[in-house]
Amino acid sequence: MSLLGDPYWSPLKLHDSGNTVIPVTTLSFKVSDDEAHEIRKQAKLAGITVSDFLRRRAMGHVSGTPVGKVRCEFTGAEIFAPLEGAGPLTTASVREMLSDFP
């Protein structure tokens, strides 16, 4: 069954390689070697990729600490702790986060 005919997946493109490609925009900009080093260092300290670090900074989601982990009170599994000031992750909150995703 092909998802390419499904209106929900219509933004997807089939690449010549046969892989499905989700169209995204690439941003690039110039920085000095010192700035690049500092950006990479801060991203590493935060435990995230440079892309995620810059995305969070640009969108105002600045957190100087890496994502913490906690024990789930129901299953005992180790899970990601919510960000400071954020409520618990629910089905409704995930649906809202993904509403703009193609």
Image (cartoon, rainbow, N blue to C red):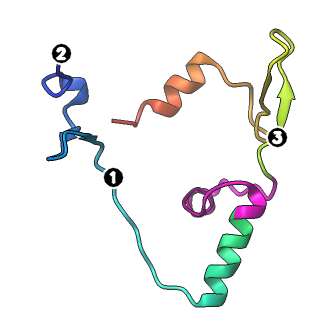
Give the mark toward the camera: 1 or 2.
2
Which quadrant of the figure has residue 65?
Answer: bottom right
For the point 83% across and 18% down, the residue is 72
Q: Is residue 88 above or below residue 15?
A: above
The residue depicted at 54 percent of the width and 86 percent of the height is 31
Identify which amino acid the numbered label 1 is placed on.
Val
- Frontmost residue, 27 versus 58: 27
> Is label 2 in a helix, a strand or a loop?
loop
Disc 1 or 3, which lies upstream in sequence? 1
Bounds of the magenta segment: 44-65
According to the image, label 1 marks what residue?
24
Q: Is residue 36 left or right of residue 98?
A: right
Picture disc at residue 80? none
Residue 13 spot, x, y in % from top left: 19, 41
| Horizontal arrangement in the rendering, residue 10 relative to residue 72 (left or right) | left
Mark 2, Cα crowd under 10 Å, few <14 / some 14-19 / many 20+, is few
Q: Residue 18: horizontal and vertical position, in percent?
A: 19, 39
User: Residue 51: within the magenta?
Assistant: yes
Question: In which image quadrant can residue 63 be found?
Answer: bottom right
Q: Which residue is mark 2?
A: 1
Measured Cα–Cα span from mark 3 to mark 2: 40 Å
Can you identify the residue that label 3 sits on?
68
In the rendered image, residue 46 lying in the magenta stretch gets the answer yes
